[in-house]
Image (cartoon, rainbow, N blue to C red):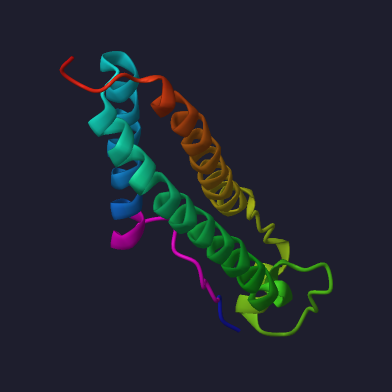
Amino acid sequence: MSITCGWETATSQIRVCIVLSAIYTTYLAIQAVQNESRKNTDTYLQTAAFLSFLLVTTGIFDILSVLDSMNDNFSMCGSSFTKSNNNVSSQLNGIQCSFSLFWSIGVLSLASGALFYFSAGVMHSFRKSIAIDSL
């Protein structure tokens, strides 16, 4: 009997880069609104769509990985666990597996991607009302 964990909890370097890019892009959006800066608004509009795509893609892959992990660990976590004479399997009989934290990370990534896409539309309409910088 083996435990299969096919999902790593948001520690990969690519996720860290995506999150740091999203934080910096959000900072640019705040600066664009506070200073009415067209340059920061344009930078945000150029990066928001791509970051939205990356967040949604990683969210989908996270959810698919959780589903795969649930399927791989069904013999240990499922209700149809059969007892055997093996000590390890008889000790594992009472394991209750919870995937709620892993689900929440995938769902939050999907929600963040959707919010980035929505905020790009709001920022696009805000850009039309900004006068040219330095006037």
Q: In which quarter of the image is the N terminus?
A: bottom right
Residue 16: image location, x then y, percent: 31, 52
From this viewpoint, is residue 12 visible? no
Judging depth in this view, the residue of 134 and 47 nearest the camera is 134
What main secondary structure does the magenta stretch of the protein show? loop
Q: Nearer the viewer, residue 89 or 50?
A: 50
* Residue drawn at the location 49% of the way across and 28% of the way down: 125
Q: Residue at x 54, y 66 (%)?
A: 61
Q: In this view, does 62 lie above or below 135?
A: below
Classify residue 13 by image quadrant.
bottom left
Q: Magenta span has 76?
A: no
> Which contiguous range is marked in magenta?
4-15
The answer to which quarter of the image holds residue 68 is bottom right
In the displayed structure, would residue 111 be above or below residue 122? below
Tally the marks. 0
**Which quadrant: the C terminus?**
top left
Residue 115: x and y, percent?
Answer: 54, 38
Farthest right residue? 80
Measuring from the top left, give residue 132's x and y in whole percent. Answer: 25, 23
Q: In this view, does 9 lie to the left or right of 96?
A: left
Which of 62 and 92 lies nearest the eye of the viewer? 62
Q: In the image, residue 117 lies at what x, y percent?
A: 52, 43
Task: Please indicate whether residue 98 sits to the left or right of residue 7 in the image.
Answer: right
Establish if 129 lies above or below 75: above
Magenta residue check for 11: yes
Residue beneath the point at 34% across and 29% down = 29
Observer able to see residue 68 = yes
Q: Using the image as rendered, state which of residue 35 and residue 101 is in the foreground.
A: 35
